[in-house]
Amino acid sequence: MNSTSTRTRSGARSFLPTQSPEPEAFRNGHASRPTGVATPASGTVSARPRMESFSDPALETIATKLERGERLGFEDGLAMLRTRDVTGLGALADRRKSELWGDQVFFVFNRQINPTNACVLDCKFCDYALRPSDPAHYAMTIDEILGRISPELSEVHIVSGLHHRWRFEYYVDIVRQIRLAFPKIQIKAWTAVEIDFFSKISKKSIEEVLATMVEAGLDSMPGGGAEVFSERVRKELFQHKIGAEEWLEVHRTAHRMGIPTNCTLLYGHIETMEERVDHLLKLRALEDEAPGFLAFIPLEFQLGHSGLRARSASSVDGLRTVAASRLLLDNIPHIKAYWVMLGEDIASIALNFGASDMDGTILEEKIAHAALAASPIGVARDRLVHLIHEAGKLPVERDALYNVKARYPEPVAG
Ligand code: V47
């Protein structure tokens, strides 16, 4: 593990680094070693004098709080999401990110697999899932799933629809057969929504479902399905899906069992800024209570055929959301710039707005592309390395659990 993990009595552990980044991350002229000291769960104690100046007085207040190691609150979150001084906010978030990770930006050689798009939930915002009665739906056999995997991958990321006929044992077998065929590949599988569904169809507790998955080969869990923790939005857009309490309970249980997970926010649809901030604070509270998040991924809503909005969130809104997340989620190690939904260019810019991870090569993205995302459906490793270099950062290839696999220092000119 790249970060020093700190275990609590329940088995939950924080992956936030307890020390400044290793000096070798700063070879090849990639920035000087940061002087700030990251203090988990309580913001930052910075040894550096303030370099930023702000046109928005709210950012002055926030910068002062950060210098004092004070935690940011709800009003700070709102001010960050609304500020017109987006570069000032970005500078603050980039400083915090550098205190945690230096100039390193992480990515993984991975593939996404979506075993079926048949789903019993019928969420209004989702263009990927089809009703079970729709003859156009697909459902993969285990051989079809295995056929998509090659041994060089570090991670497979599996997210599925909730199939009307598949039994719990089939979902377990997907994990088991991948583990048997590719013992070195880490398996990041099933969102909290799927785990909750498995619990219902198998009549097992969340803990039993997770234990069965771990025994079959699961290494970590992705962060999807959280959408936005608002009952108002849930009733409007995804009324049959689990709400905040159940989503948080699945991740709480996973963390207590020592399973690392991610978390997400789906933004840019009908949610308010207040609902975004409330969502972020609920994630932060869970990480305080039962640590175990590796990364937070802000997912920009892709309009697709949903008709929910005339336009997608602006690029500036995307950058503010990344930066505000970095500063509010002071106890979560990484913020991902998810190039699939942000687009490659904005994702590369987001690496100077607090993001420290680009997810990965992905190779076959279906969810955002069903909703007409303009990004490629997958990218080569070289492309991610290039996007990270373009942002002036140091690309670090990792595995699913953030063990470092390779560093890609910029070729020295001349
Ligand atoms: O849960 C569905 C969202 C999620 C749309 O954990 C949409 O490392 C945008 O969670 N526009 C799946 N988003 C993706 C996801 C994810 C992606 C990358 C990394 C990780 C990780 C997790 O996508 C779903 C849902 O929240 N989604 N439809 C849409 N039209």
Image (cartoon, rainbow, N blue to C red):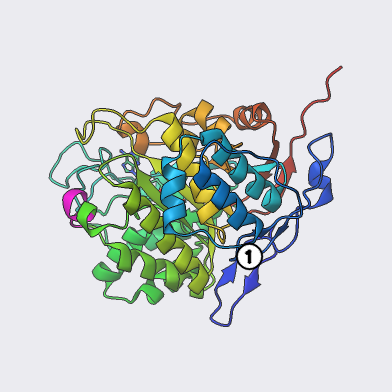
In the picture provided, is 278 more to the left or to the right than 90? left
- Ligand number 1: quarter of image: top left
- Residue 222 position in % (x across, y down): 45, 54
Q: Is 137 in front, or is 314?
A: 314
Which quadrant holds the C terminus? top right
Q: Name the quadrant containing residue 162.
A: bottom left
Residue, x 36% and y 36% (percent of image)?
Answer: 368
| Count of labels in the image | 1
In the picture provided, is 31 more to the left or to the right than 315? right
- Residue 84 position in % (x across, y down): 46, 34
- Asked whether residue 227 is in view, the answer is no
- Residue 148 position in % (x across, y down): 46, 40
Type of the residue with mark 1: Pro
Residue holding disc 1: 40
Residue, x 60% and y 32% (percent of image)?
Answer: 384
Q: Which residues are magenta?
A: 234-240
Q: Residue furthest bottom?
A: 9
- Against 370, residue 216 (above or below) is below
On whether residue 231 falls in the magenta region, the answer is no
> Is disc 1 surrounded by few (<14), some (14 to 19) or many (20+) residues within 10 Å?
some
Q: Residue furthest left?
A: 133
SS of the residue at dot 1? Answer: loop
- Against 414, residue 221 (above or below) is below
Residue, x 79% and y 26% (percent of image)?
Answer: 411
- Asked whether residue 294 is in view, the answer is yes
Q: Is 379 in front, or is 318?
A: 318
Which quadrant holds the N terminus? bottom right
- Residue 161 position in % (x across, y down): 29, 50
